[in-house]
Image (cartoon, coloured by chain):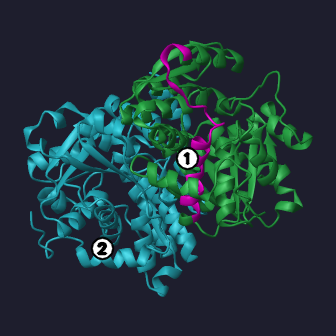
Chain colours: A green, B cyan
């Protein structure tokens, strides 16, 4: 699929600019392979370990790109966001590096370890209720009071451009990849990864992995328009957001399919990451492996020749107690 | 300290030969850094993540070197070893790659996940009692019955040469390192790492990390001869062996100091590896970080200028239940 660069929120030049901007600050994360997991999946898997990114998730790429894109005048008043956790921590860390304030609206049900990361990086925490609407209202109020710049977690060209740098690295580290499996939530990660990867290699397939209990993206693809859900129900706390107007066109046009998995598949993938890869991943981070191991992927003839599969392991921030309680069930 | 290559079981040429021999089979493991852990320790830390090595531990380097050193006649009858786990799994895997049998004597108290690794790689398991003496007797019997070659877990030039390839890689990945901290048990790992590192840079410091409940190496250094203990008591199941005649001279001459830590320090280091590095490490694998964070290291003026510290994270094979039960205490 050719990428028409006029149509979307980011393009190869914005990815390359982002890469140059953030490279002094980010970790170039390793690509891990495991013959045991290749044998289990029947494919060759390349794990792009963004759980090792600063702040414990890919979110630092976009946050860093956004923060260092601001001119000095904009930056002086600081930034605001609302996030279930990883974007919040990433923005706090990037703001700290630039020496500006970060006001972070966090829902009360966010995982403890993600809140701790925000604190560790010196973010100014403002609590909201769990619902997206409450988060947005509180953020709006903070914006008015501080005059800071809103950095949306995903519906933002700077964020999408930052996340897309994953593809630039991954396709350099493992150029043989023919497919990339990416977790989908608000779509910032997959938009960046899909646009950047297909700009480099239009033949590459991009598959989204989504929890069945928050399958708004799968429903949106089926309906041909953005669908939101009255509620979501999944262990993958990072995958409960809905597509935005900048990410939807990319998902609609450039994401080849959406594979939905249930929480028990996510938990089993977490266990395999822990036991075989020796990598601590959060549920949202393990979902790509869960998708590749799912029957709906394995049995779909369309993906029979997906043999060299990049999997974006998106984050590693999981409370040990949550990990343990989910694995022992 | 200059390395006199006549005196020891391995030398730079044996390390380079080993590296050429094993490179097609091993993972070149990443070196991870964390600004959070730098801040906590007050030094710059470079984690050489052998937990990501095939088989989940550095042991695959030595095992692979030993197995592929055998001539076809020797190899045909297979190999034998006794091990608490990681060497066993590594040898089974290397033997599988060469297509020869591996007879593995395993003590009944070995961690479940390590036994499973041996099974996964097709090793032929023979059980022994927990004591070293029982392991050795059973191994001797198997040797007589099979005519296979004994590959000792550490007191073997081929093993020491394989483990030393860690230093060749590490000093290429992070040439600024002035100190390497290495877990010590039978001494195969630290002998290889010390000989190889000091062959390249005689000024580099090599510090051993040892559990207080199995401090035979510290006692040996103090006594000027190999000391063994009637029993050991530590969560670090990989660090209960005693020095051998090939490893002792290296430990005596080239290991600058031995830092002992108690189990609670090891557990805290495991937690930091899990929560901050996002890496699953076993207790023996976390002990290097525990040593760097210990008061006895921090307060020792001799190590005040150890500023760029390589830490060998030796293995990642930990039963989740063991991890959980130790962390929640």
- Say if residue A123 shows up in the picture: yes
Disc 2 marks which residue?
B15
Disc 1 marks which residue?
A162
Element under disc 1: helix
| Closer-to-camera residue (B75/A319) | A319
Query: Which residue is found at the position 26% from the left and 45% from the top?
Result: B44
Image position of A143 with respect to B93: above or below: above
User: From which residue to which does the magenta span run?
Assistant: A144-171
Residue B264 figure quarter: top left
Q: Chain of mark 2?
A: B
Apparent side of residue A125 relative to residue A141 in the rendered image (left or right):
left
- Say if residue A309 shows up in the picture: no
Element under disc 2: helix
Apparent side of residue A281 relative to residue B139 in the rendered image (left or right):
right
| Closer-to-camera residue (A77/B239) | A77
Residue B319, image x, y percentages: 53, 40
User: Do circles 2 and 1 both sit on a common chain?
Assistant: no
Query: Which residue is found at the position 33% from the left and 46% from the top?
Result: B240
Select label 2 or label 1 by which is in front: 1
Query: Which residue is found at the position 78% from the left and 63% from the top?
Result: A1
Give the class, few, some or many, for how many residues have Cα within 10 Å of label 1's Cα (few <14, many ≥20).
many
């Amino acid at each position: 699929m050719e990428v028409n660069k006029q149509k979307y929120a980011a393009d190869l030049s914005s990815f390359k600019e982002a890469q140059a901007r953030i490279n002094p600050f980010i970790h170039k994360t390793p690509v891990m392979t495991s013959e045991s997991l290749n044998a289990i999946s029947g494919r060759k898997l390349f794990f792009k370990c963004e759980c090792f990114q600063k702040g414990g998730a890919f979110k630092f790429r976009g946050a860093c790109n956004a923060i260092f894109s601001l001119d000095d005048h904009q930056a002086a008043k600081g930034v605001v966001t609302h996030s279930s956790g990883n974007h919040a921590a990433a923005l706090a860390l990037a703001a700290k590096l630039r020496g500006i304030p970060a006001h972070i609206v966090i829902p009360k049900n966010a995982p403890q370890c993600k809140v701790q990361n925000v604190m560790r990086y010196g973010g100014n925490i403002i609590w909201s209720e769990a619902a997206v609407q409450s988060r947005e209202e509180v953020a709006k109020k903070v914006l008015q009071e501080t005059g800071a710049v809103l950095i949306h977690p995903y519906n933002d060209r700077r964020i999408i451009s930052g996340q897309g740098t994953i593809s630039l690295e991954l396709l350099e580290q493992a150029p043989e990849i023919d497919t990339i499996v990416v977790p989908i939530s608000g779509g910032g990660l997959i938009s960046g990864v899909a646009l950047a990867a297909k700009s480099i290699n239009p033949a590459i397939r991009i598959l989204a992995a989504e929890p069945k209990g928050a399958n708004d993206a799968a429903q949106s693809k089926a309906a041909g328009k953005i669908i939101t859900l009255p509620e979501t129900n999944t262990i993958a706390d990072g995958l409960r957001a809905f597509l935005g107007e900048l990410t939807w066109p990319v998902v609609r046009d450039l994401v080849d399919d959406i594979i939905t998995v249930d929480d028990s598949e996510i938990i089993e993938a977490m266990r395999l990451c822990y036991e075989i890869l020796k990598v601590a991943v959060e549920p949202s981070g393990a979902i790509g492996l869960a998708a590749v191991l799912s029957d709906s992927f394995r049995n779909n003839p369309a993906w029979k020749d997906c043999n060299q599969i990049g999997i974006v392991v998106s984050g590693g921030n999981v409370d040990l107690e949550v990990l343990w309680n989910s694995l022992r069930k």
